[in-house]
Amino acid sequence: MESKTRLIKGLATGIVFGFLLQRGGVTDYNVLVGQLLLEDFTVAKIILTAVVVGMLGVHFLSDRGLVELKPKSGSLRRTIPGSLIFGAGFALLGYCPGTIAGAIGQGSVDALLFGLSGIFVGSFLFAAFYERYDNLIEKNKFKFNTFPELFKINHWLVIVPLSALIIIFLVWIESIGF
Amino acid sequence: MLEFIFADSWSPYIVGSLIGVLSWFSFIISKKALGTSTTFARGSAKLGAVFLGSEVYDWKYYQKYKPELEWQSMLVIGIVIGSFISAVLSGEFNLSLIPVTDFESILNQNILGRLFSAFVGGIFLGFGARLAGGCTSGHGISGTFQLSIASWISLIGFFVGGAVTAFIIL
């Protein structure tokens, strides 16, 4: 087990995260399903703003050796079907793994009783699937984990245009009344 | 200031910025990115052991992700507490078994329908997150801002799969 200090750090980070998710409205079934039906863009606004702010900060810190980045790897065979199955579950349940924890804190009993048990069952089924087919699942991983590595360019040449693109998209979303 | 603390909701741009700043601190203080779904995988070993016995702990996946309390599990518990505090402060806390929604459907307006949609949705969500290697926070926020290729594909896949399903069922 990890040290007590680390557990407390995790708990404290989670309390702030949960507070922000609830206050942002994304622990509400309507807001999440509304995003998937393209009627409410709260989720996109929060995610994309967090991406821009997070991206600028952590790369600035990482350039100075203050933090170590850990970009996730993947493969076409895992990432594409996995994300589409996840999306289908997101629409049916109306929550994702982080926001369901927030929904529980807000009093959604359906999230606690039905949704949470479903997530445990689904994760268990994956572990069983992995036990049998781990070689197939782990095959053909991406050679490069990040876009700057793939294009062999400095990361700021991705960060700056990407941030600009996201900001333009958000301004556009606001301007058309969402 | 007081009004801000008790407000029903905050602007998504303020919330998004603060989540971005929280990510910096998470990297600095804990050397970790925000994420949640691995915790449910760890927890699922305990559930599996109830039905199939303790040999499930020897499974390859549970050797990689041992069923123990660690930083991220505490983060998930923290989310429940933080959301509870926020909901109580803004008067939004209420116990409900069926979501109050304008998107009415047999899948969310009656108890059996909601049991089915939430449980089956949860199964897809849990399986999909493990296959993709992350969820809306781990891939959708933390992975995308580290410019991970898998995370950008995942974020798009989450919303394409979600939108198609939502338009079909609701």
Image (spheres, coloured by chain):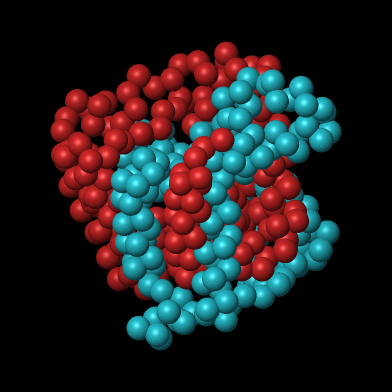
Q: Which residue is drawn at 68% across and 17% down?
A: A132
Q: In which quarter of the image is the N terminus of chain A?
A: top right
Chain B's shade in the image? cyan
Quadrant location of residue B2? Answer: bottom left
- Between A6 and A99, the residue placed more toward the observer is A6
Chain A's shade in the image? red
Q: Indicate left or right for B23 with A138 as reference.
A: left
Q: Is residue B135 visible?
A: no
Residue A21 vertical placement versus B141 (above, below): below
Quadrant location of residue A59? Answer: top left
Q: In which quarter of the image is the C terminus of chain A?
A: bottom left
Q: Indicate left or right for B32 with B61 as reference.
A: left
Q: Residue at x 31, y 36 (%)?
A: A69
In the rendered picture of this protein, how many numbered marks are placed on residues?
0
Q: Residue at x 58, y 30 (%)?
A: B65
Q: Which residue is drawn at 49% across and 51% down?
A: A8
Q: Indicate left or right for B4 with A151 as reference.
A: right
User: Residue B165 location in percent, x, y?
Assistant: 61, 50
User: Residue A175 location in percent, x, y?
Assistant: 30, 71
User: Residue B24 location in percent, x, y?
Assistant: 31, 50
Return the residue found at the far top.
Answer: A135
Quadrant location of residue B33? Answer: top left
Q: Is residue B109 visible?
A: yes
